[in-house]
Image (tube, grey):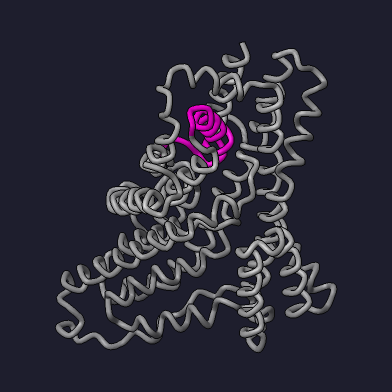
Amino acid sequence: MLATLGALTILVLLAVIILDLASPLVALIGVPVVASLLGGFGLKTAGFMVAGISAIAPVAGLFVFAILYFGILADAGLLEPIIGFILRVAGSDPTRIVVGSAALALLVHLDGSGAVCFLVTIPAMLPLYERLGLDRRVLACVTSMAAGVNFLPWTGPTLRAAAALHVSPLELFRPLIGVQITGQLFVFATAIVLGRREARRIGAIAATGATPATTAPAAAMSDPALRRPRLFVVNLLLTVAVFAVMISDIVAPVVAFMVGTVIALMLNYPRPADQRARIDAHARPALLMAAILLAAGAFTGIMGHTGMLHAMAQAAVSAVPVGAGRQIPFVLGLLSMPLSLVFDPDSFYFGVLPVIADVAHRLGGHPLAVGQAALLGQMTTGFPISPLTPATFLVVGLCGIDLSAHQRFTIPFLLAASVLMTFAAVLFGVFPL
């Protein structure tokens, strides 16, 4: 009974989100509440929700303060000198331009927002591509790859996976550092190959007689009145310190970003009115994601405490050979990128991942490894080509290309990155083969 109710709950949740019948926030709260009431749990449902929300609170706090922190420093102009440097170094060499595009996207995506990454990187680099006649699909591809492999403790997929599995984002991320570096090296290797191919296609720089492109403007990331160029070094050192404290696990990640946000505000905008204005400017995206994460906590709390998740896992265990749980992370890693074309992040991480993790655990695997396998592709390398995410349409719109052209060109490279990182995870011992 519970297994059937749980399966129906997840199917309805997926259908509601994928068919856009309701927002993820409404679906994550409304669907499990109705299921719990139909299951006869009555007012106990409220307690289940509170328990789930309590477990998710640190993750929601991490995302809120990460958004505020990076937004404040972007307003202060932290990234602008770095963007200008990349544009100057790229010059008119196609290979340098393509590699610079990847480097810039990797840097800008440190805030965890794919939309911000594309809005900054593509307008900054597109004039160089147009001036030299480079294929704009290449810009879309390397930008998507750089953002896709750059999953971090505060990015959406990591936070969702941590929330669904009730673990710290750092527990998921820290073992994947070597795997992520492998993916980043692949991105730059691909950028070099694509850049050289473009150079050959346009007849090479020497043959064209092109002069170094030094006048292409960098994207303005902030209002000039908000920039604090004299504090660039201080802001950079502060960011390095926040990263070091967080990754070393000296304090909880949410604490690192909370304190970092306070210091960033006091250094760059000491006037209380300015501080309030900067918080207000970035409150909307922070609030929206925090609301989604808290709703997800209510969903996982109901699914777990009603026993639906346990019953579904038990039913699945009976259909899978004993010992196969150890191979589930590897298989999921290989499939994770294509799954982005089928599931949006909320429906996968909050509806599908907990079931797979529980099944793997009962069959001798580790739930943490399942979450790590999902991060190798599901809405990481997969999000810039998925029609289920607005960021995909942002990429093709900014580059001025068709979605189908972008997908045909970019999917093979993103899939290769995901598969490579899966095998790297095996070599690094993150999960067994």
Q: Work out whether 306 lies above or below 142.
A: above
Q: In which quarter of the image is the N terminus?
A: top right
Give percent across and percent down for residue 414. 35, 52
Q: Position of residue 359 (x, y in %)?
A: 51, 28
**Direction from residue 126 to residue 70 in the image, left or right:** right
Q: What residue do we see at 54% from left, 48% from top? A: 157
At horizontal 20% and vertical 74% (from top left) the residue drawn is 199
Q: Which residue lies furthest to the top in this view?
A: 1
Q: Residue extending furthest right?
A: 272
Q: Is residue 22 visible?
A: yes
Magenta-tinted stretch:
341-364
Instruction: Pinpoint residue 133: horizontal percent, then vertical percent.
Output: 25, 71
Q: Which of 406 and 144 is in front in this view?
A: 144
Query: Residue drawn at (71%, 20%), measured in percent from left and top?
Result: 36
Residue 412 is left or right of residue 176, and the answer is left
Q: Which residue is drawn at 43% across and 49% down?
A: 376
Say which quadrant the C terminus sits in: top left
